[in-house]
Amino acid sequence: AAPAGGAAAGAAGGGGVLALPGQKVQDVGGAKDDGGDASGTVRPGGILVKSSAEATSIPTPKWHAPWRLTTVLSSHLGWVRSIAFDPTNDMFATGGADRVIKIFDLAKACVGAPDALKITLTGHISPVRGLAFSPRHPYLFSAGEDKQVKCWDLETNQVVRHYHGHLSGVFSLKLHPTLDLLVTGGRDAVARVWDMRTKHQVHCLTGHDNTVGALLTKSTDPQIITGSYDSTIKLWDLAAGKCMTTLTHHKKSVRALAMPSFENTFVSGAADTLKKWQGRDGRFIKNLTGHKAVVNALAVNDDGVLMSAADNGTMNFWDYSTGYNFQKTETVAQPGSLDSENGIYAAEFDLTGTRLITCEADKTIKIWKEDEEASELSHPIDMAGWRKKCLAEAKQRY
């Protein structure tokens, strides 16, 4: 019998690939075999076909302008560990190892105006590791290594609530997008879900063996995703307070999670690789390899730019949909600081996605933006290198 679909195309080189029932076989060079279906699907039963390397479809990356540093803010007296944007995009807050939270005017900060700092909030007695503005209330939530989770009223700049219960430092904090819930993860290896109004703990999400260092919340199930230093990611059923799925693919601590607004997927970052997952069931989609460092922060904007930032000051920019790494750069340690102080601890795009703010170990806050002069001619996509990488990864057997 004639081989199905594009099987005829695979006469050249490469190893044989077993196509499973219902799987597509990429047709190469338009060579259609009359015997197979025009669609190129494999008939039930699965036929062993000889495939050339060409059978791997190479996704075409979207072109993005490279990012460059525009402004440096020196205000904190310690490492800057966390950042959050106000829902109106007028201001952002940063928390540091100097135990204070500083709120900046975004527009003034972007041009480096001397009066960009609006207010400094004191009250934590250890580094501030998590911040979040509430979209529905004039509140700012903060979490620190002093086990405290505080709610600040930004009209009076006072602490109005404490969420008491963590047994050790709190490393991550997120608000639920639709419910008045607050989720915090800490060194006591649990994520705690708090009722914002009553200050009561609704759930204690247990199961991790080590610090919960990263959190995501979303309005559809799984509503909470936790990344832990035990190198696993757990997806939680918020109603039951139970774990739905555990993802054990990473070999190193998961220190960062990011989720785009435009599709139901998420990315996790660890020292081994970045991995992209289906948001609904946690199905593994692909590895984003190439950032060989301890990735501390991930951020994604609406244009589909994913940024990963690491302990050694390296920043990689990726095209989110294909995983193409279009820019590798390094942050510049502030003059006078040690070279070893060029780590990046937190990073976030502003709400428009046109500015990127990184929080660093040289005690500065750096603002990056896209290079306006760059074009597809001046910074072309390295299709040859990308193609080579795709084919190498397609051949790899784990």
Image (tube, grey):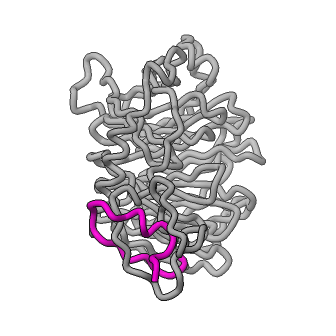
- State the image quarter where residue 152 is shown: top right
Spot occupied by residue 187 in the image (x, y as percentages of width and height): 39, 62
How far across and how far down the image is residue 261, in percent? 65, 49
Residue 170 can be seen, yes or no:
no
Quarter that holds the C terminus: bottom left
Q: Nearer the viewer, residue 28 or 171?
A: 28
Q: Please state which of residues 294 and 210 is positioned toward the viewer in this rendering.
A: 294
**Is residue 358 inside the magenta stretch?**
no
Q: Residue at x 44, y 51 (%)?
A: 58
- Magenta stretch secondary structure, dominant: loop
For the point 38% across and 47% down, the residue is 296
Q: Can residue 150 be seen in this view?
A: yes
Q: For this rendering, which residue is in front, 214 or 398?
A: 398
In this picture, is 376 found above or below 281?
above
Region rendered in magenta: 1-22
- In the image, is residue 21 part of the stretch drawn in magenta? yes
Residue 367 at x, y percent in the picture:
49, 25
Where is residue 61? Give x, y as percent. 49, 42
Q: Residue furthest right?
A: 136
